[in-house]
Image (cartoon, rainbow, N blue to C red):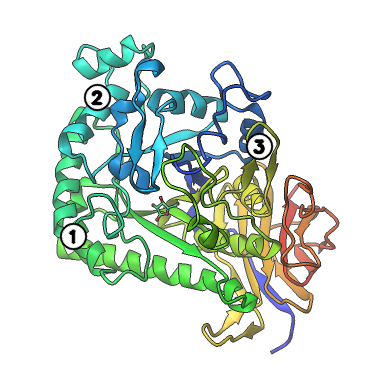
Amino acid sequence: MSNTAKMIVDKDFIISTIDNRLYGSFIEHLGRAVYGGIYEPGHPQADEQGFRKDVLSLIQALRVPIIRYPGGNFVSGYDWKDGIGPKDQRPDRLELAWRTVEPNQFGLNEFVDWSRIAGTDVMWAINLGTQGIDDARNIVEYANHRSGSYWSDLRIQHGYTNPHSIKTWCLGNEMDGPWQIGHKNAVEYGRIACESAKVMKWVDPTIELVACGSSGSGMATYPEWEAIVLDHTYEHVDYLSLHSYYGNHENDTATFLGRSLEMEDFIRSVSATCDYIKSKKRSKKKLSLSFDEWNVWFHSNEADKKIEPWQIAPPQLEDVYTMEDALVVGCLLIALLKHSDRVRMACLAQLVNVIAPIMTENGGAAWAQTIYYPYMHASIYGRGQALVPLIQSPKYDTNTITDIPYLESIAVYNEEASEVTIFAVNRDLTNSLPLEVDLRSFGNCTILEHLVLENSDLKATNTSAQPNRVQPHNSGNAKSDGNRINASLSKASWNVIRVSLH
Ligand code: AHR
């Protein structure tokens, strides 16, 4: 096979009109995500509510459409009522998921206020670990019912006359995991998820619900968990969740870069399981997927074992991301786009300080990690229609994964802006990759810009001292000739080729 990669893109070969919520994220009461991350009264950049404006502007630039909150493992022991009402009456609680103390100075109403400023919607996860049907219906009544009932009037008394209108709700978190507070087997979870779903939708029929799938494809109960849970919940829920984290534990970068192929396999088999239950139930409904936790996570594993318990907001899960992690995140974003007909929502886990694209210092600076850039590019330029990528690429094998294409790519057509954006990763660690794109159904094309994220050191990071060591440049060499594009993709690079169709 030649060492040139070829791609055909045709505007009639559409995967999906992308749901913008594919570019969602996640904030958990964990480590310094909330306290010292998005909320830090007394910080020089804090507004009158204690929200850090420097962090907000980094988030606004990402155009995050939806944020999952308040957990994660945290939510399975959380009483949402601890986080409402006068702050001086809120309790300090032992938080058992991450062994910290939760001061409850930031809760539901603060998050809704903050999310409006951040320009994002809320995806609220309810506690199905230590709580159940009653709290499930009560929180929907508090958040979404207009007035004239105990919980809606309490919200009004707390200063929020208008309902929050939270549309998207997760029915618990990773309930298949033995580490979860209130862990359940699939039948136990399926039953409580079904009964909670019913009452939540009776309170507010406009909401959408996400049932918990497995917390990873490596779980012993996967995919039987999905089948049993959906047997109980299929007609009551709108999405099934997937979670997956990737790491370079063996320092084998070639394999690490191929992990997005495993993400695609995971999506395919969860889709098949949903369709099996659809046929079993003779249902007309096709269930969508919410990949509501995904990222690279491994750098902080050892440091986290040494953290003293029962502190408020210690530095937990603070992965410092490298250039190669950004390439993996780029490949994972492309994998999500390739399955965007089925995966309608996804959340990069997480957003600030905790396995996050944004880092802060308490009382100090905020900056963008390496993975911030592919996420930002996809969120900004990846809106419109995902087009089928017909790709011919040279491939490589590693000891664990075979047939990994050097080129990972997809194109998104934004009809309104009359633009096509090609996202491409060159997985080759030693050679640049010639790329030919045939945009046959489009007219004359002009290159608007070719953004590239690359670094001679794959382990390069951005830190407080060097916040801009890894950042994109726009000196990529893509050229157009009619409706054909040629580029040479630098070794180990993330590329965004923006094409105007005017
Ligand atoms: O995102 C960190 C943790 O990973 C979440 O709390 C949990 O849901 C998952 O295991």
Mark 1 CB lies closer than 8 A to ligand 1? no
For mark 1, does the 10 Å Cα neighbourhood hold few (<14), some (14 to 19), or many (20 or more) residues? some
Q: Amino acid at mark 3?
A: Leu
Specify which label sits upstream in the sequence, 2 or 1. Answer: 2
State which mark lies toward you, 2 or 1.
Answer: 1
Residue 458 sits in which quadrant? bottom right
Q: Is residue 387 visible?
A: no
Q: Above or below — where is 266 with respect to 378? A: below
Q: For disc 2, does the CB lie below 8 Å from ligand 1?
A: no
- 351 displayed left or right of 233: right
Q: Is residue 88 left or right of residue 65?
A: left
Which numbered circle lies on residue 141? 2
Q: Which sits earlier in the primary sequence, circle 3 or circle 1? A: 3
User: Residue 173, image x and y in percent?
Assistant: 32, 49
| Residue indicated by mark 3 | 58
Residue type highlighted by circle 1? Asn
At x 44%, y 62%, the residue is 244
In terms of secondary structure, where does tag 3 sit? helix
Where disc 2 sits, the SS reads helix
Q: Tell me the element at label 1.
A: loop
Asked whether, in this view, residue 195 is left or right of residue 263, the answer is left
User: Is 26 rendered above or below residue 480?
Assistant: above
Label 2, label 3: how far apart the Cα atoms are: 33 Å
Placement of the N terminus among the 4 image quadrants? bottom right
| Amino acid type shown at disc 2 | Glu
Mark 2, residues whose alpha carbon is within 10 Å: few (<14), some, or many (≥20)? many
**Residue where numbered disc 1 is placed:** 185
